[in-house]
Amino acid sequence: MAASMNTQLPLDGELEKIEINLLLEGIYRRYGYDFRNYSYASIRRRIWHRLRLEGLENVSSLQAKVMHHSEVFHRLLGDLVIPVTEMFRDPDMFLAFRRDIIPLLRELPFIRIWHAGCSTGEEVYSMAILLNEEGLLHKSRIYATDISESALQRAKDGIIPIDRMKKYTKNYQLAGGQQSFSDYYISDHGTVMVKPFLRQPIVFARHNLVTDSSFNEFHVIMCRNVMIYFNSQLRDQAHKLFYESLAQEGFLTLGGKESISFTPMAGRYEACNDKYRIFRKIR
């Protein structure tokens, strides 16, 4: 007599997780974007947001659309890489960077800075403004990378949402701004754009922290509020990449909810300012 087989279907939650894993695997194989080790709760929430907008009933239906219609994939991609950024976000961090790190960078003949996960560029331009006010922009190169082509294009364009100007001006002042914030942008017919001299030292390029390797040696790496969406395996992988990309005694700056602790690289940094998550590579 043949052995009996358990034909019971998985519970709804288990089935949904299988569907989501298959969707993420399909996205990786079809389009090259790897979200397989992102935080499950965050990915699930964003997938269901797209499901409702597309009028679909389950994840398998979305997978079919994504695999066969690139425009649906790009709409989903926009949900998965939602940019959350602003000029001089967390002003006290920029103030601490100006006070504690800039004097050390001043000693270098040339400065290379990597903004990993730059989104639409607001933080990158904030750094350019800070370097300009400290007289270091002329000997700096800023590399701004992101997984999203659409976010990078917006960053390259240097257009600032006019409805955020009041907030950004306040942030700039709180971050120790030394001039008038209006000195850094051009306003014309309701459009606000950063001045060309701020864009000149910036290289924008697509880079995937999950699948791509190191591409230079940097004195500063800024990766703030990106790894909160990663699971522990992916965080460790990113930290290894950052460590390999930092020059000796280089600086790594993370988001307020991120840390070096409990990663394989924990003993290789010292905290320059633990409150604002600024660390220095020591070995």
Image: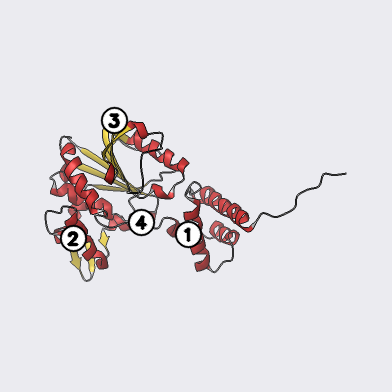
* Mark 1 vs 4, N-terminal side: 1
Residue 118 placement, left or right of 232? left
Labels 2 & 1 near each other (Cβ < 8 A): no
Numbered badge on residue 151: 4
For the C terminus, give its image quadrant: top left
For the point 20% across and 42% down, the residue is: 140
Q: Which residue is mark 2?
A: 185
Q: Which residue is mark 3?
A: 282
Q: Quadrant of residue 221?
A: top left
Circle 4: residue type: Ala
Q: Which residue is mark 1?
A: 46
Residue 112 placed where, x, y %?
25, 40
Q: Is residue 127 visible?
A: no
Residue 50 placement, left or right of 120? right
Labels 2 & 3 near each other (Cβ < 8 A): no
For the point 20% across and 46% down, the residue is: 96
* Mark 2 vs 3, N-terminal side: 2
Q: Nearer the viewer, mark 2 or mark 3?
A: 3
Q: Tell me the element at label 3.
A: loop
* Mark 3 vs 4, N-terminal side: 4
* Mark 2 vs 4, N-terminal side: 4
